[in-house]
Image (cartoon, rainbow, N blue to C red):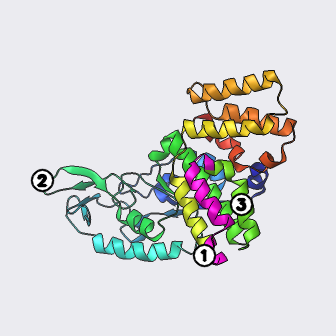
Amino acid sequence: MVQEAVTSGEYKIKIGISRCLLGEPVRYDGGHKWDRFLTDTLGRYVSFVPVCPEMECGLGVPREAMHLEGDPQNPRLVTLRSKIDFTDRMKSWAKKRTAELEQEGLCGFIFKSGSPSSGMERVKIYGQQGQPAKTGVGLFAREFMDRFPLLPVEDEGRLHDPLLRENFIESIFVLKRWRENVDKKKDLKSLLRFHSDHKFLLLSHGRNPYQVLGRLAAQAQGLSLKERLEDYQGLLLDALRIKPTPRKHTDVLMHLMGFFKKDLSAAEKEELLDVIYAYKQGLIPLIVPLTLIRHYVRKYDQPYLKNQYYLDPHPLELKLRNHV
């Protein structure tokens, strides 16, 4: 189901990204931080909207290096050698740029880790004694996340973690589907279908978030449809921030197995249980039990599971579940 939509081109997802990660020579020294996974692999399925705060606010290349200093809650952006303060200039530009990005329909943003303008967390802030503390957020990144508090965001450093990478990419695909199938149609039928098709994906993030979303989709007394859709989207994106775990995935896998209790032979049941247990023990990746379950979905023509995005939340070519 997912594969057909992705390869047809209708699933091109707009993602904001720090321009240097695309290999463009925009860093202070004229260099770049090209990330080939982002351009060569993820780039097949997304459309990047590149942003370089320093370049776009007129600082040019090459330029003097800068860092954050002072109050951790309100740091200043200052050049290292000449001590020129570009804080107000950067903040003013960031407000204008994020307003422009609001028109782009972004499904997420990938920041440059450690950047005084674009780092989303653990950016160095230098105190009076010159000792750095990794407690800061880049000025543009802070403005962006304040303006779009629910949008999926990551930095390229954190995306080296397979769990964080899979979760971020899953989230942007879910958000794209929400916008195209529910937000665009704005009717109760599309909301209920979306919730049903994402049942096991949501359960992998937590039983409680799934149940809360289910009650909102099915009942939500006293709320207009518009309010219900807005609340569901907010709770959905909050739920996707809760990271799946092997235990949660195992619970979902066992639930999926229950759909075949009248179909599987004794040998097939034993094989599937062995594979699920091996995954739970960390001996094999998630893709192995999922591949076996997808085989049984086709073999026994299980109609409900054919529509479950948990089995195909993103293109197999990304190989995200080969490493979780």
Image spot of residue 44 (x, y percent): 66, 51
Q: Nearer the viewer, mark 3 or mark 2?
A: 3
- Of labels 3 and 1, earlier in sequence is 3
Q: Which residue is mark 3?
A: 194
- Identify the disc placed on residue 301: none
- Of labels 2 and 1, earlier in sequence is 2
Is residue 228 something that shows in the picture?
A: yes
Q: Which residue is mark 1?
A: 227
Q: Which residue is mark 2?
A: 129
Check if mark 3's residue and mark 1's residue have beta carbons within 8 Å: no
- Mark 1 surroundings: few (<14), some (14-19) or many (≥20) residues within 10 A: few
Q: Is residue 279 left or right of residue 309?
A: left
Give the residue at x 35% y 65%: 139
- Farthest residue, direction left: 129
What amino acid is at disc 2?
Gln
Task: Look at the numbered disc 1 and give the secondary structure of its residue.
Answer: helix
The range drawn in magenta is 203-228
Foreground residue, 274 or 13?
274
Compute the Cα span from label 3 to label 2: 54 Å
What amino acid is at disc 3?
Phe
